C-alpha cells in the first residue's frame, strides 16, 4: 500500500470527530511531499510522511511489547495512531527549496538545491503540532503531552523538569520519544 493511502487509512480508523477535516487540510498542504528535516533524517521529498509512518510502526511495537510484559499496562491504539502520525505536523508548509553554490567533482561552481526553513508560524515544535491538530480534532491530555514532549531532552535545559513530569505521568510520552529516535536514527538516513 502506498504511504499516503496507509497514512489516511490509519487516521480514518480512529473515527475521531473532525478527522476528515484534518485529512482535507493535509491535502491542502505540503505534508505528503515535505522532507522530515533539512539535513538529517528524511531530508528528501516525502520524508515527513515516511517518518510519520516509521514512528507509528516503532511506537506500535513499543506499546505492544510493554503491554505483553505487564497486564496492568494498557494503551488506546487510536491514541497511538494520533500521536505517531501527527507528532511532526509542525513541519507542514515550512520547507522551501533554495539554491546554493558548491563545487562539482571538476572544481566548477554549480547551483544545487537544498531545503531551507521558512516558518511563518513560529510556535515551537511539539506545541505547534498540538496546536495544529487541535484545530481539527479533540485530543486527550495523553496525546497532547506525548506530542509536545516527543523531542525529549533535546529541548532546552529549562524544559527538563516539565519533560520529566510528563514522562512520569504518561508512559506513551516516553515511548513516543523512543519511537521518534529509532525512526530517525536507525531507520532513516540522510539523502546522499
Image (spheres, rainbow, N blue to C red):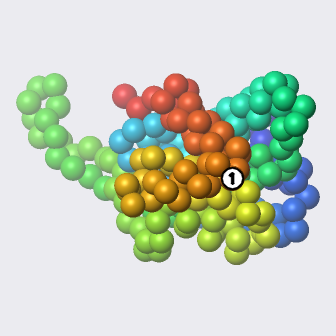
Look at the picture and state if 132 lies above or below 54. below
The percent coordinates of residue 47 (x first, y second) are: 54, 42
* Residue at the image point whose x is 55% and y is 51% from the top: 164
Residue 98 vs 183, above or below: the answer is below
Count of residue discs: 1
Residue 161, above or below 42: below
Instruction: Say left or right for 57 vs 87.
Output: right
The percent coordinates of residue 54 (x first, y second) are 64, 35
Q: Image quadrant for the N terminus? A: top right
Q: Residues within 10 Å of mark 1 (few under 14, many from 20)?
A: few
Residue at the spot 43% in from the left edge and 71% down from the top edge: 122
Quadrant of the rendering where the C terminus is positioned = top left
What residue is drawn where x is 16% and y is 25%?
105
Q: Could you tell me which secondary element the residue under label 1 belongs to?
A: helix
Location of residue 51 (image quadrant): top right
Farthest left residue?
107
Q: Nearer the viewer, residue 109 or 27?
A: 27
Residue on which disc 1 sits: 169
Q: Is residue 74 visible?
A: yes
Residue 37 location (% of width, % of height): 44, 47
Is 130 positioned to the left or the right of 190 in the image?
right
Pick whichever, 120 or 172, lies toward us. Answer: 172
Residue 187 lies, in percent from the top left, at: 55, 27
Amino acid at each position: 500500500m502506498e504511504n499516503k493511502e496507509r497514512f489516511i487509512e490509519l487516521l480514518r480508523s480512529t473515527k475521531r470527530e473532525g478527522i476528515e477535516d484534518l485529512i482535507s487540510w493535509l491535502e491542502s498542504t505540503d505534508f505528503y511531499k515535505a522532507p522530515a528535516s533539512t539535513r538529517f533524517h528524511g531530508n528528501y521529498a516525502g520524508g515527513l510522511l515516511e517518518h510519520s509512518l516509521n514512528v507509528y510502526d516503532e511506537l506500535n511495537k513499543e506499546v505492544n511489547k510493554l503491554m505483553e510484559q505487564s497486564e496492568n499496562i494498557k494503551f488506546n491504539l487510536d491514541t497511538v495512531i494520533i500521536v505517531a502520525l501527527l507528532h511532526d505536523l509542525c513541519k507542514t508548509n515550512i520547507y522551501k527549496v533554495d539554491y546554493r553554490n558548491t563545487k562539482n567533482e571538476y572544481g566548477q561552481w554549480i547551483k544545487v538545491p537544498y531545503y531551507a526553513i521558512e516558518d511563518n508560524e513560529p510556535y515551537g515544535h511539539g506545541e505547534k503540532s498540538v496546536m495544529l491538530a487541535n484545530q481539527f480534532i479533540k485530543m486527550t491530555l495523553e496525546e497532547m503531552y506525548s506530542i509536545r514532549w516527543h523531542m525529549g531532552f533535546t529541548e532546552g535545559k529549562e524544559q527538563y523538569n516539565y519533560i520529566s513530569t510528563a514522562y512520569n505521568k504518561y508512559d506513551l510520552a516516553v515511548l513516543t520519544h523512543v519511537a521518534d529516535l529509532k525512526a530517525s536514527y536507525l531507520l532513516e538516513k540522510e539523502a546522499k
